[in-house]
Image (spheres, grey):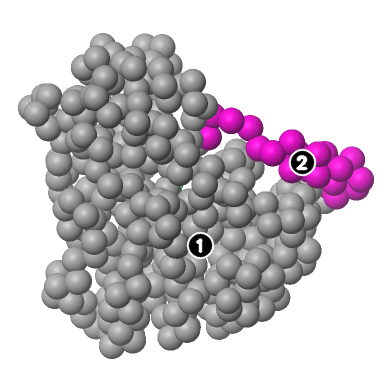
Amino acid sequence: MKSKLPDTGITIFSVMSSLAKEYDAINLSQGFPEFDCDPRLLKLYEHYLKNGYNQYAPMPGVSELRNALSKKIEKVFQKKIDPDTNITITAGATQAIYTAIATVVNPGDEVIMFDPSYDCYDPAVRLNGGVPIHLNLKFPDFAIPLDALKENLSERTKLIIINSPHNPTGAIISAEELRALEELCIQFDCYLISDEVYEHIYFDGLRHKSVIEYPELFKRSFVTFSFGKTFHATGWKLGYCVAPEHLTQEFRKIHQYLVFSCNTPAQMALADYIETESYVELPAFFEKKRDLFLNAISTSQLKPLPCSGTYFQLLSYEGISPKKDTDYAVELTKEHKVASIPISVFYEDGSDHKVLRFCFAKNDDTLLKAAEILCKI
Ligand SMILES: Cc1ncc(COP(=O)(O)O)c(C=O)c1O
């Protein structure tokens, strides 16, 4: 058989997690919380499981959840979003992103994405016959390279993909960058996917800016979210896509044949849980974890880069080792028993800034133990 993705191997997350297991290392590599979801959310799930909510949900998602999301979006982003025509519940953000790419990309279309980029964008573009164009975010602040973007936009560009708060760097897109993207998307008549799975994890008085808040940009956008990231429930694989009606219609034509619909009792539980504004504590909760980790490594030779959001902290090991980041991440796991993610794997051109990504969505004890080791290096 001819492979459709000949250059694609196993994701770095699986590779580093297995290595962590094999060497009994503290696993700060893969991006999932070490702690469980709120017991109140689990109780709600149990309630719906035991009370007959075990058959197919409607294709776009249960109306209770879409209504709750519409209210939440109005509270958080001050925008009215129609629950029936603008919101589709998906099997995680990954499926929302794949479906949005499949909705707009035809063979030969160019899709611009910014590296380091989350690893599900590029293969989804290729599988749909598109041509990924990778542009590097500016180092070290990871801002959008607007000049390079302008040079690469053309009538062949069908789609731009952005992600904020940004995995793996923790950068947050600015209002100026969003306004520039709005102008360029209109000028070049292209679509946008805005991956906002870390919408509730931002720090230092900053706020997450959503594409939903930019009406002209939103008209041509798919905005994707994940309940997994927000409610410490990555294993539920539930997310949603917010898009204008004409795009949602086309999105759902594909969504219905990819998954048809998603887990019913989990959707019902999330609908009740969101109504209680269960997301407002999140920025402070994760800011405390980031600060605990940063304080604990303050005497380490590994130097932190700024982190404005997400639950990832980048640490530079420049000055400790000349090794490639992929090799140094392996050395750190095998010899020092702390697993991280090398960020060069998120660059198409393999750019290596000697930086590793550490996930701090972990129990305080775990973070302190890892920090103690890192301080001794
Ligand atoms: C930037 C980004 N986008 C999308 C996803 C996928 O989210 P989900 O687990 O809801 O599919 C992740 C998960 O790590 C992510 O970090």
Q: Is residue 297 or residue 61 the one in the foreground?
A: 297
Q: Amino acid at mark 2?
A: Arg
Residue 211 seen by the camera: yes
Q: Which mark is residue 190?
A: none
Query: Is the residue at mark 2 in contact range of ligand 1, meaning its CB lies under 8 Å from it?
Result: no
Of residue 128 and residue 29, the one placed in the foreground of this image is 29
Q: Bounds of the magenta span? A: 33-54
**What residue is shown at x 74% (from left), y 43% (from top)?**
41
The dot on residue 224 is 1
Which quadrant holds the N terminus?
top left
Q: How many marks?
A: 2
Residue 298 in percent (x, y) is at 27, 29
| Residue 323, position as x, y percentages in the image | 11, 26
Quadrant in which the C terminus is drawn: top left
The residue that label 2 is drawn on is 40
Is residue 58 shown left or right of residue 163? right
Q: Of helix, strand and loop, which one carries label 2?
A: helix
Residue occupying image coordinates x 58% and y 76%? 78
**Relative to the observer, which residue lies in front, 131 or 217?**
217
- Between marks 2 and 1 in the image, the one whose residue lies nearer the viewer: 2
Instruction: Classify mark 1 as within 8 Å of ligand 1 or not, answering yes or no.
Output: yes
Q: Residue at x 39, y 72 (%)?
A: 192
Residue at coordinates 62% horizontally, 53% vertically from top-left?
A: 279
Q: Is residue 222 magenta?
A: no
The verdict on residue 43 being magenta is yes
Q: Along the polypeptide, which appears first: circle 2 or circle 1?
A: 2
